[in-house]
Amino acid sequence: MPGWKQRLPERTLEDITPAELERFRTERLNSTKPATINREYALLRRVFNVAIRDGKTERNPVTKVGMLREPSGRVRDLSDAEESELMTALAIEAHRHRVTVLLQTGLRKSEFLGLRWKDIDLKAGVLTIPRSKSGETRHIPLNVDQEEPLAGEAK
């Protein structure tokens, strides 16, 4: 994919129009997903905003070009057979415990890796993520399997 400099050769920021950007976007839709195009235009919007801040231009034509609708993310759960196969493939018991927590809570990798024992209240059955992706505290109910203790918990 050619960069913006190749698409708009020898042009000043003032020469670029929303209609031109619309045309480029429509052409890109033939070969590129909407999410990719949206990211490209977000970058271009930022370039114009910095140029406005620095007094290089007075307007941002990208703001006149709407963002494309992106498909929502796909959520997929493991089937019982897939979950069983995964657990069988994990040779180390501690790994099985970790995967069980991930499957039952839906934690993000960064949330799981950042967990500390102080974030887990087994009596209340709640796991607390002090700072989630959104920056907010998140509380996740635990489904504690009483047959198998968590790692570090006495039987």
Image (tube, rainbow, N blue to C red):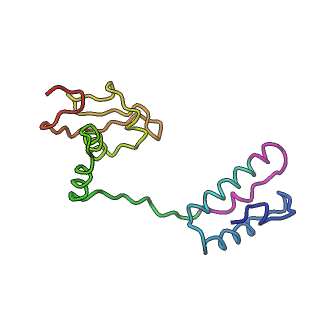
The one nearer the camera, 44 or 111, is 111
Q: Is residue 55 magenta?
A: yes
Residue 10 horizontal/vertical position (percent)? 87, 63
Compared with residue 111, is residue 89 higher up or lower down, i.e. above or below? below
Point 32% across, 24% down: residue: 118
The one nearer the camera, 119 or 51, is 119
Q: How many numbered marks appear?
A: 0
Point 43% across, 58% down: residue: 73
In the image, which residues are magenta? Answer: 50-67
Residue 41 horizontal/vertical position (percent)? 66, 58
Point 31% across, 26% down: residue: 117
In the picture as drawn, the residue positioned furthest to the front comes out as 91
Compared with residue 42, is residue 137 higher up or lower down, i.e. above or below? above
Point 73% across, 61% down: residue: 3
Residue 30 horizontal/vertical position (percent)? 61, 75
Determine the image quadrant of residue 38.
bottom right
Along the horizontal axis of the image, is 81 left or right of 31?
left
Along the horizontal axis of the image, is 126 left or right of 19?
left
Q: Is residue 77 magenta?
A: no
Along the horizontal axis of the image, is 144 left or right of 114?
left
Which image quarter is the C terminus in? top left
Determine the image quadrant of residue 11.
bottom right
Which image quarter is the N terminus in? bottom right
Determine the image quadrant of residue 20.
bottom right
Along the horizontal axis of the image, is 89 left or right of 70?
left
